[in-house]
């Protein structure tokens, strides 16, 4: 990777020994500014010897107090008020290509191949210049003495007839980054700190992160190198100490065995390294200090652009909420609330607990976890299931219209003894309530065991995905519907029901779609995948909605990390996000939103950042609807909508539009108020905003 071409700013020195630069020159280099503690500060200094002893020096390239670049002429015609300057602030912790064009009449400053500053010069010399031109020589340009923490790559001196853009695109530098879309099993607190369940082995949870090694044009590096993950303190970046005779603070999982993360680096393959980690040290045992994870490539040198830090982390122990508590609510006349998807239950004292129609996407630690980034996908669909499809052993279920599709509402479970129920609940009152509910269940035997139910309730997202894939190979849809009801019962939350119920059709339709597009090939050109997905998307939504646009496919490509050639892994990642969205759009009330041209309620697939950018400067109550890119099947929120809106405090908020009740009540033939009306009834949502797409 040419790591020897990377160097410190202070080591850069340009000498004109055998170079005729009297007619001008280009100085081109890649610059990485890590820290700028003192401003203004000289980046490059020019030094010229006028006499065997006397020297003269002046800035050549300077960073002013506003972090703008200033390019000065050579000492032979130096004037303090003559310089070319950039208008924008120079970015930190990012590789930027800098080009300096210097002639006796003109200064030009380039950033990433584009002119950002220009200054015309006069031929008159400054008073400090040398009067005898025979003694004038081109100065040496050096980074020595700079107070900036900067790094330089691929510095080159070129004649003015050259093209700076050729140097810009020829050999870009590399940088290590975190792919936030790959994160799962990570919560985000209201203060922006990541919250991860850790501690002793019986409680801590796996979480995943991917890092990418790419050049400045976002192209993956093909060389295989090893990346190491280390747990450090967020305030001073010092390593978290390993307790005496205890486990390492950060662990990684290989083939079901845990190792110290420092002992098991992960290989970068096609520009990406994946980590499955656990934290054994709690913040509460370290004076409540925050952690972060440092990823680095030790064998390539100690460079800041070859290491990257995660967000601050608060490591907590697992919350053990009483799962049976929700069974204490009596079902009665129900008030439907759209954006939290809840039905207002009548409590034992007769009072009504009526939540807001909108619920915050970020919840307290005691509530349901909020995962960050695109959920990491598991392995391919089982080969024997694919063979069953090919041989016609398993019937394919076509997409079922919401007019014909109904959930199975009967609760079928094995009889559970009163003793088992009492062990399950944490207090006597809940135990009695649980017993009465369970004892009333039909005693039909079910092929899906109680162990599977508890595995699903207690497992993380990846474990749930694996379990559902295995079940989908043999279980019927009726059995999966029963399983969904049992999970809802034992977890005390009905939010999982929909994702379980669609799992068989999701997998079967995904296999069918891939087989049609791939034609038994292992990789498919992206353009072939686009045309195949477009046709399948319209089929899934009954052709009642608009087609996917180029911007929609751009987002799908980012969600799935697809390259020009798409593997089955990438297709599955894309499919697990797209299928729940398409199912949502197939519902009649949502179809009207998606197909509405005036006003445009849903402007295609957009990111959280695009929604936030479009709402900046808007008044309170302005909102945009979007599908969250961080929710994939079987996450309970997959396919749901998020309302991004400007609050009364003029800050941007994100709240979930839960559609559970639409699936539940719509299947029973109940009339539901138009979703547009329900949205505008919310006090936080007053007017529909528009997406401003960057060119």
Image: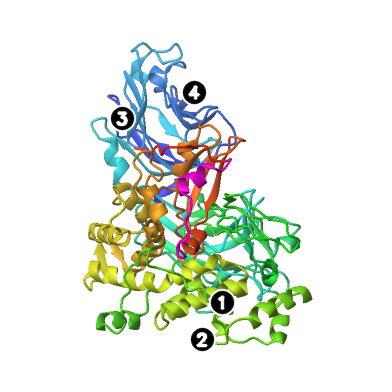
**Mark 4 → mark 1, Cα distance in angstroms:** 88 Å
Q: Is residue 348 above or below residue 355?
A: below
**Labels 1 & 2 near each other (Cβ < 8 A):** yes
Residue position marked by numbered label 4 in the rendering? 54
Q: Earlier in the sequence, mark 1 or mark 2?
A: 2
Q: Secondary structure at mark 2?
A: loop
The CA span between labels 2 and 3 is 80 Å
Pointer 2 local density, CA inside 10 Å: few below 14, some 14–19, many at least 20: few
Closest to the observer: 546 or 289? 546
Q: Give the residue at mark 3.
A: 25
The local crowd at label 4, few if under 14, some if 14 to 19, many if 20 or more residues have their Cα within 10 Å, is few
Residue at position x 46%, y 15% in the image: 81
Mark 3 touches mark 1? (CB < 8 Å): no
Residue sitting nearer the eye, 360 or 485? 485
**Label 3, residues with CA under 10 Å away: few <14, some 14-19, many ≥20:** some
Of all residues, the one furthest to the right in this rendering is: 428
The spot of residue 420 in percent (x, y) is 69, 85
Can I make out residue 321 in this image?
no
Which residues make up the magenta segment?
666-683
Q: Earlier in the sequence, mark 4 or mark 1?
A: 4
Given this view, does label 2 or label 3 mark the residue nearer the observer? 2
Of the numbered discs 3 and 1, the one sitting upstream in the chain is: 3
Residue on which disc 2 sits? 446
Question: Residue at point 68% right, 66% down?
Answer: 329
Q: CA distance from mark 3 to mark 4?
A: 26 Å
């Amino acid at each position: 990777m040419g790591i020897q071409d990377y160097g410190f700013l202070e080591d850069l020195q340009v000498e004109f020994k055998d170079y005729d630069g009297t007619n001008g020159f280009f100085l081109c280099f890649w610059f990485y500014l890590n820290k700028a503690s003192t401003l203004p500060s000289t980046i490059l200094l020019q030094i010229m010897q006028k006499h065997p002893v006397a020297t003269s020096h002046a800035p050549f390239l300077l960073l002013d107090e506003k972090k703008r670049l200033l390019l000065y002429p050579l000492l032979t015609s130096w004037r303090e008020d003559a310089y070319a300057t950039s208008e924008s602030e120079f970015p930190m912790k990012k590789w930027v290509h800098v080009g300096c064009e210097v002639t006796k009449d003109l200064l030009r400053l380039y950033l990433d191949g584009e002119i950002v500053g220009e200054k015309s010069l006069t031929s008159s010399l400054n008073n400090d210049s040398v009067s005898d031109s025979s003694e004038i020589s081109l100065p040496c340009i050096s980074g020595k003495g700079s107070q900036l923490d900067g790094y330089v790559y691929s510095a080159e001196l070129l004649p003015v007839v050259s093209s700076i853009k050729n140097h810009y695109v020829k050999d870009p530098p590399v940088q290590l980054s975190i792919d936030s879309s790959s994160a799962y099993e990570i919560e985000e607190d209201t203060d922006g700190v990541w919250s991860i369940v850790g501690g002793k082995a019986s409680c801590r949870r796996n979480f995943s992160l991917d890092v990418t090694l790419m050049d400045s044009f976002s192209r993956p590096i093909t060389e295989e190198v090893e990346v190491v993950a280390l747990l450090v303190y967020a305030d001073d970046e010092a390593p978290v100490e390993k307790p005496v005779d205890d486990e390492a603070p950060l662990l990684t999982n290989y083939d079901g065995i845990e190792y110290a993360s420092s002992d098991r680096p992960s290989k970068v393959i096609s520009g990406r390294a994946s980590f499955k980690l656990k934290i054994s040290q709690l913040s509460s045992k370290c004076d409540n200090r925050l952690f972060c994870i440092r990823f680095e490539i030790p064998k390539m040198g100690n460079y800041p652009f070859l290491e990257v830090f995660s967000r601050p982390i608060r490591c907590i122990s697992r919350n053990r909420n009483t799962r049976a508590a929700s069974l204490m609510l009596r079902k009665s006349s129900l008030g439907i609330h759209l954006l939290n998807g809840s039905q207002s239950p009548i409590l034992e004292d007769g009072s009504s607990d009526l939540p807001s129609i909108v619920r915050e996407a970020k919840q307290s630690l005691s509530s349901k976890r909020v995962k960050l980034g695109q959920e990491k996908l598991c392995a391919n669909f089982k080969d024997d299931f694919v063979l069953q499809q090919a041989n016609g052993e398993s019937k394919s279920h076509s997409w079922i219209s919401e007019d014909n599709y109904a959930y199975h509402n009967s609760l079928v479970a094995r009889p559970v003894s009163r003793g088992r129920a009492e062990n399950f609940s944490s207090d006597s009152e809940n135990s009695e309530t649980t017993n009465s509910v369970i004892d009333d269940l039909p005693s039909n035997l079910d092929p899906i065991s109680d162990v599977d139910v508890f595995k699903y309730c207690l497992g993380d997202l990846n474990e749930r995905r694996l379990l559902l894939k295995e079940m989908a190979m043999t279980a019927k849809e009726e059995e999966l519907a029963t399983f969904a009801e049992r999970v809802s019962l034992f977890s005390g939350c009905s939010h999982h029901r929909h994702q379980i119920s669609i799992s068989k059709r999701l997998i079967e339709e995904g296999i069918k779609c891939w087989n049609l597009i791939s034609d038994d090939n292992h990789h498919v050109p992206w353009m072939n995948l686009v045309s195949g997905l477009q046709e399948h998307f319209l089929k899934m939504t009954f052709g009642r909605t608009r087609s996917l646009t180029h911007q929609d496919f751009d987002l799908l490509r980012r969600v799935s990390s697809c390259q020009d050639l798409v593997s089955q892994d990438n297709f599955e990642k894309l499919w697990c996000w797209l299928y729940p969205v398409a199912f949502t759009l197939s519902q009649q009330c949502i179809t009207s939103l998606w197909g509405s041209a005036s006003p445009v309620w849903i402007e295609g697939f957009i990111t959280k950042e695009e929604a936030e950018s479009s709402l900046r400067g808007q008044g309170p109550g302005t909102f945009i609807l979007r599908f969250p890119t961080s929710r994939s099947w079987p996450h309970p929120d997959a396919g749901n909508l998020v309302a991004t809106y400007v609050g009364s405090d003029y800050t941007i908020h994100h709240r979930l539009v839960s559609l559970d009740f639409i699936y539940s009540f719509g299947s029973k033939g109940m009339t539901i108020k138009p979703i547009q009306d329900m949205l505008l009834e919310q006090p936080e949502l007053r007017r529909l905003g528009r997406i401003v797409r960057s060119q």
